[in-house]
Image: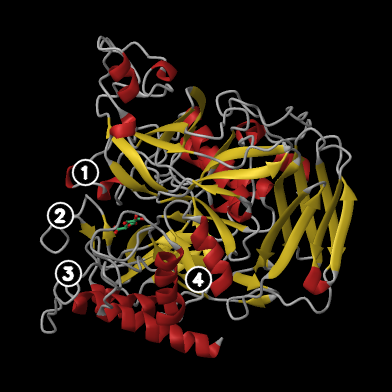
């Protein structure tokens, strides 16, 4: 893969008010997606100097989107309304004739990051537009320094106004975005207004119907990130299968061309040096030293790495490992590995989650997989999870499947929907390409086959490869089934498979459909592709503590445990199987699930929402422990 393919970016006016630099020329062979890759990557932003804007923010509901349009629906200039720099209280005191229908700086207060559903009982089911406001001082204004306003994620559409100026907007609920606000900041009393609209539409990604809670709001950290004027905007540092450590670096700023760059790994006595081209890019490589300790789940070695360019020094902790497929096997560092995993939604333990993923919350979830289940792998479904989680997976030694929310029936025939999905995928890959834990980029989940879907997903799969040729590409697929000679017979034949490195199938025989749970172990699987298969989902629901050993009825722990035993027995008979991620670690909120056992929760967790282990947990844990002992 060539750096030029990655970094051909356009700082579109829609995205940044103060463009991040001149637009580099687009080489003739650059793929068509390049124009929608965001202008500012700000790689590794969570390790840069800056100031946190997390903490208490004012919030104000706007279900009729009054701040966006007048009473006849004519669009409003928001910088003259809620996005203005007016102090409502002072203005009304100063002039008795003046009035406003809003007062963001005196609206109620809630914590950021957090979904707003936890702010007040009446917001529990609120989906729509929410205005946020925060006043802050900053010590970051210095000559020769740039300051970016970064959102680690906001769900779903975000419009940003600073000190009465429109800064930009972003669509997509799970990936980071940044704006250069150097020229808009003042030292005292900055007025930051952010409108977040959680409304899903038929054209959004995902659409209105999913099987999880829409956690609207500023769900991840908001920060001011400081960099020198010319800074390292992107780097991609990895071990390749031909034994090289490669580093691609892209600078942004007025002196990005002809700049000396040095990538060092002091513990390995490695120093890669070069000079950037006219676009601010440089590609470096060196043979990996013999004493390199490869990252793996058993030995999650991370090295301190620094990237120096001019006055910028960006540090990271990076693991080096290779991942590839050989026939029906997944190969980590040259050795076959079976993925002992489980799926995970981004939802913390507890009775009232609000997608508040702190390092402690993430560690609690991942520890249950790594230590509790003896796992080596997690499927972060169904959208990019917090960078806190992928960094922790690096540190703890868990392989990761990372996914974009092209879920069920998105508008495959809408080119704008494809652009949204492409941007999300690019933002996700550019954020996490340096995480050794991430081995699979997934482009979709359970999508209905059609020509439009096939070409939409083909475009995504090819882009994932173009952005990162070192990882595997997959998608969670569905299959048909037949009954042949009294057994369930499944053939994997999705037309997308030629585009994928790894086949993945969600299968629920014994839970959904008419098949008897007793017939599941004898299921025969066929594949005409010489590729590895992951069972990316299987699962059954139970309410923790509900037992029925005699009948083993639905929604009891006994049923779920039996389902796990039988499905794992089926898995044992699939010769091309390379991994498992049953559905799912923890019971999670889903408004679709409303029977007496569920009441707004999908109960397919092997632990309850509070972390109590169900019988199925122990079935899986024993199975993985035995497998780990053999590997
Ligand atoms: C699936 C979906 C997942 C659902 C799960 C279920 O196949 O991929 O998002 O939550 O089934 O519980 O039915």
Distance in Å between CA atoms under marks 3 and 4? 27 Å
* Residue 320 visible within the image: no
Distance, label 4 to label 2, CA atoms, is: 31 Å
- Residue 7 locus on image (x, y percent): 72, 40
Helix, strand or loop at label 3? It is loop
Residue at the disc numbered 3: 555
> Residue beneath label 4, please?
377
In percent of width and height, residue 337 lies at: 59, 76
320 vs 187, left or right, is right
Task: Report the quarter where the C terminus lies.
Answer: bottom right
Q: Secondary structure at mark 2?
A: loop
- In three-dimensional space, the C-alpha distance between marks 1 and 3, rounded to whole angstroms, equals 26 Å
* Residue 133, percent from left and from top: 38, 35
Q: Is mark 3 within 8 Å of ligand 1?
A: no
Q: Point out the frontmost of discs 1 and 3.
A: 1
- Measured Cα–Cα span from mark 2 to mark 1: 15 Å
Q: Are marks 1 and 4 in contact (CB under 8 Å)?
A: no
* Badge 1: residue crowd in 10 Å (few <14, some 14–19, many ≥20): some
Q: Give the residue at mark 1.
A: 125
Question: Callout 4: 10 Å neighbours few (<14), some, many (20+)?
Answer: many
Q: Nearer the viewer, mark 2 or mark 1?
A: 1
């Amino acid at each position: 893969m060539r750096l030029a393919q990655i970094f051909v970016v356009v700082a579109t006016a829609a995205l940044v008010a103060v463009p991040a630099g001149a637009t580099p020329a687009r080489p003739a062979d650059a793929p068509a997606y390049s124009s929608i890759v965001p202008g500012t990557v700000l790689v590794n932003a969570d390790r840069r100097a800056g100031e946190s804007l997390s903490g208490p923010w004012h919030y104000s509901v706007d279900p009729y989107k009054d701040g966006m349009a007048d009473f006849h629906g004519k669009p409003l200039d928001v910088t003259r309304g809620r996005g203005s720099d007016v102090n409502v209280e002072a203005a009304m005191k100063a002039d008795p004739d003046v009035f406003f229908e809003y007062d963001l700086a005196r609206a109620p207060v809630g914590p950021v990051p957090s979904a707003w559903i936890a702010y007040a009982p009446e917001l529990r089911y609120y989906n729509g537009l929410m205005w946020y406001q925060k006043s802050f001082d900053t010590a970051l204004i210095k000559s020769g320094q740039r300051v970016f306003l970064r959102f680690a994620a906001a769900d779903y559409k975000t419009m940003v106004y600073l000190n009465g100026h429109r800064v930009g907007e972003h669509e997509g609920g799970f990936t980071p975005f940044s704006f250069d606000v150097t020229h808009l900041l003042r030292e005292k009393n900055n007025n930051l207004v952010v409108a977040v609209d959680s409304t899903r539409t038929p054209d959004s990604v995902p659409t209105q119907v999913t099987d999880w809670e829409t956690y609207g709001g500023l769900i991840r950290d908001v920060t001011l990130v400081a960099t020198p004027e010319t800074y390292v905007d992107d780097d991609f540092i990895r071990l390749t299968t031909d034994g090289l450590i490669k580093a691609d670096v892209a600078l942004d700023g007025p002196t990005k061309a002809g700049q000396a760059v040095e990538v060092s790994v002091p513990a390995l006595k490695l120093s890669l040096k070069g000079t950037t081209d006219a676009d601010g890019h440089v590609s470096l490589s060196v043979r990996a030293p013999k004493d390199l300790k490869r990252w793996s789940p058993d030995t999650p070695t991370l090295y301190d790495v620094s990237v120096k360019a001019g006055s910028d020094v960006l540090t990271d902790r990076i693991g080096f490992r290779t991942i590839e497929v050989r026939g029906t096997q997944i190969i980590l560092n040259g050795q076959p590995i079976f993925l002992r995993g489980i799926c995970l939604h981004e939802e913390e333990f507890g009775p009232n989650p609000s997608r508040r993923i702190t390092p402690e919350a993430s560690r609690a979830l991942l520890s249950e997989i790594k230590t509790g289940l003896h796992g080596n792998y997690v499927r972060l479904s169904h959208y990019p999870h917090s960078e806190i989680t992928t960094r922790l997976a690096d540190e703890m030694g868990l392989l990761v499947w990372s996914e974009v929310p092209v879920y069920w029936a998105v508008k495959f025939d809408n080119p704008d929907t494809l652009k949204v999905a492409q941007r999300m995928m690019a933002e996700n890959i550019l954020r996490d390409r340096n995480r050794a834990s991430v081995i699979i980029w997934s482009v979709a989940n359970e999508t209905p086959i059609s020509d439009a879907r096939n070409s939409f997903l083909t475009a995504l799969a090819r882009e994932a490869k173009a952005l990162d040729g070192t990882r595997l590409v997959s998608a969670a697929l569905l299959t048909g089934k037949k009954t042949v000679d009294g057994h369930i017979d499944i053939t994997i034949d999705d037309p997308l498979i030629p585009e994928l490195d790894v086949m993945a199938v969600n299968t629920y025989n014994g839970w959904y459909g008419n098949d008897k749970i007793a017939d599941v172990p004898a299921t025969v699987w066929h594949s005409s592709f010489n590729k590895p298969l992951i069972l990316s989902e299987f699962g059954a629901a139970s309410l923790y503590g509900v037992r029925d050993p005699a009948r083993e009825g639905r929604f009891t722990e006994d049923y779920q445990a039996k389902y796990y035993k039988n499905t794992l027995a089926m898995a044992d008979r699939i010769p091309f199987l390379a991994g498992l991620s049953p559905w799912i670690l923890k019971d999670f909120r889903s408004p679709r699930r409303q029977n007496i056992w569920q009441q707004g929760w999908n109960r397919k967790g092997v632990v309850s929402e509070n972390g109590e282990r169900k019988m199925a947990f122990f079935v899986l844990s024993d199975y993985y422990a035995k497998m780990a002992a053999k590997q």
